[in-house]
Amino acid sequence: MRDLKNIDRLFQENLKDFEVSPPNRVWNAIEKQLPATSKKRKIPIWVKISSIAALLTLLFSVGTIYFLPTSNFTKNILPKNSKQHQKIDARNNIKTTTSVDKKSSRENTSEEINEGGIITYLSDLDDEIYNNVQENETNNNNNNNNDSKNNYYLTDTKNLPYLTSSKKVSKKGVTESKFTVATIFAPIYINSFGDGSGVDSQFRSNPTSGNSSYSYGVKIAYKLNNKFSVQSGVNLISLGYTTDGVYVTPGVSVIEFSNLSSNPILSKNETISSKESENSGSLNQVFGYVEIPVEVKYNVVNGKLGINLVGGFSTLLLNKDEVFVETNSFSQSLGSSNNLRSINFSGNIGLDVDYSIRKNLYINISPMFKVQTNTFSKNSGSIQPYYLGVYTGLNYKF
Amino acid sequence: MSLNELVKQCAKNNRKAQEEIYQLFSGKLFSICLKYSKNKQEAQDNFQDGFITIFNKIGQFKFKGSFEGWLKRVMVNTILLKYRNRTVLNIVTEEIPDEVIVDIDDDEVSLDFLLNLIQELPDRYRMVFNLYVLDGCSHKEISKMLQIAEGTSKSNLARARAILKQKIELHQESQQSI
């Protein structure tokens, strides 16, 4: 159809829905000319955070080395052992052992046996450790367990002053807002990578399992910006391992555990029956730490319900350490282990969900996964403990 | 991600958000460039420059009014700046009729043909024609944007129309003669 048309209309109508995509390569050209991605900006933030974290750790570790009397870590267990060295048959003969450090252990053993011969025979089925067992009469101290329990509480309370003092340290930095203090409680589930037992390498092939435990303490956090905050604090944590499949025989001989430093005082319970099945027991290693975490928190979701990612590490200071042997019929302390390092570290990663109750008050639940490094100094197989904890806390912002 | 969130991310130089914005609006903005530029190559150059300007200035967008409108204005302004100083044509104001009528069959002209006609216009005429006819600006606005007198804008528009009419008619003749 031929038409007389206003030239403006002609163009307007035809070009109304005109849309053409540019060639694909144009975006690449544009991208090249845009300022480099924010990666560059991120680096300084990370450097900042990590340097703060490093500084805090340094302060804490230096602080703990200087301010904490070492006796707290080493002498807290079994001060009453001497009481147990009663009525010992000096005739005890020992033929041992396949332990790794034979020389030193032998010296130890003979000393011990001379003064105290409560005799037990422990052996792994696979490892052929052979002992001459001589039946012997020994005093059975039913008090033992009670005694050692008391010691626990003692050790715990011993460390309380430390807890408060380090709280003061961390609070010194409080000058402006953006700070959060929180109480923390967490059930802990512990287990380990690798084979081995914390007690002795001879138990490497025995089934080991972690005991559930708990941790509590205080936390202090500082908000760097909208996304990042750093947090630290002090927690007390107790952990435990059970090595199963250990044979316990009431007897006259003493076997060496390379990683047990104190006198292996083993007592026979009068009520033990001689049935083989009841001689199978487990070794429980219980140890506790003062944990000083330094973590960075990254906010993913903000609002009444916040979700954060948490990563960092902890300095762990040993404050409790004891090994028990446990069978169906009795439980007995063996002393403390000497292969636990007094300071070790853990890498932490986890999630933090918080829910604000009021403007300044919120609760948080934070499942954390922590892997310990250099927990044991020697003779423990390739064991590397890790633990899972669900940290809950009441937080106050100021 | 909402458009507003995308814009905010672009301001933070988030490359993904920038690419997404690009994908969303490249078609519309490129067609603007084709209309305002001399040819496809220049359109591409202008488009590229315009988009870089957009990303550099995206932080200035205050979330008032339509984002697409803002994008178009930035793009057009980038192109205008380029051609504004290049044109040395200063047509003396003359009396030209407001309306130009062409005798045309819709089927005879393709979009490409019309686009080509616009691109072939001298820079200033092309700017004024685009702004006035296709983007609905008044002569007053055009005079400000191009820093010319209103009268100049009017006469530029008239000249543009005359040229277009002439070319369309030429085209029709050549079609008929075949």
Image (spheres, coloured by chain):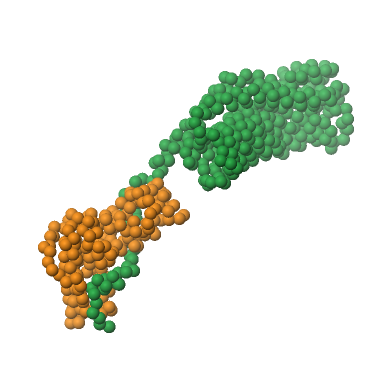
The residue lying at 42 percent from left, 49 percent from top is B9
Residue B129, quarter of the rendered image: bottom left
Residue A160 vertical placement versus B44 (above, below): above
Q: Where residue B95 sits in the image (x, y, percent)?
A: 13, 68
Residue A372, quarter of the rendered image: top right
Q: Where residue A177 sits in the image (x, y, percent)?
A: 50, 33
- Compare residues B68 and A353 and report the one nearer the observer: B68
- Compare residues A62 and A181 and report the one nearer the observer: A181
Chain shaded green: A
Q: Where residue B94 sits in the image (x, y, percent)?
A: 12, 66
**Is residue A241 at least partly visible in the picture?**
yes
The residue lying at 48 percent from left, 34 percent from top is A50
Residue B4 vertical placement versus A92 (above, below): below
Colour that chain B carries in the picture: orange
**On the picture, is B139 further left or further right than A300?**
left
The residue lying at 48 percent from left, 41 percent from top is A226
Can you say which quadrant of the picture contains the C terminus of chain B?
bottom left
**On the picture, is A317 further left or further right than A141?**
left
The residue lying at 56 percent from left, 38 percent from top is A360
- Compare residues A333 and A348 and report the one nearer the observer: A348
Residue A270, quarter of the rendered image: top right
**Is residue A202 at least partly visible in the picture?**
no
**On the picture, is B83 further left or further right than A244?**
left
Q: Where residue A305 sits in the image (x, y, percent)?
A: 57, 46
- Compare residues A1 and A113 and report the one nearer the observer: A1
Q: How many marks?
A: 0
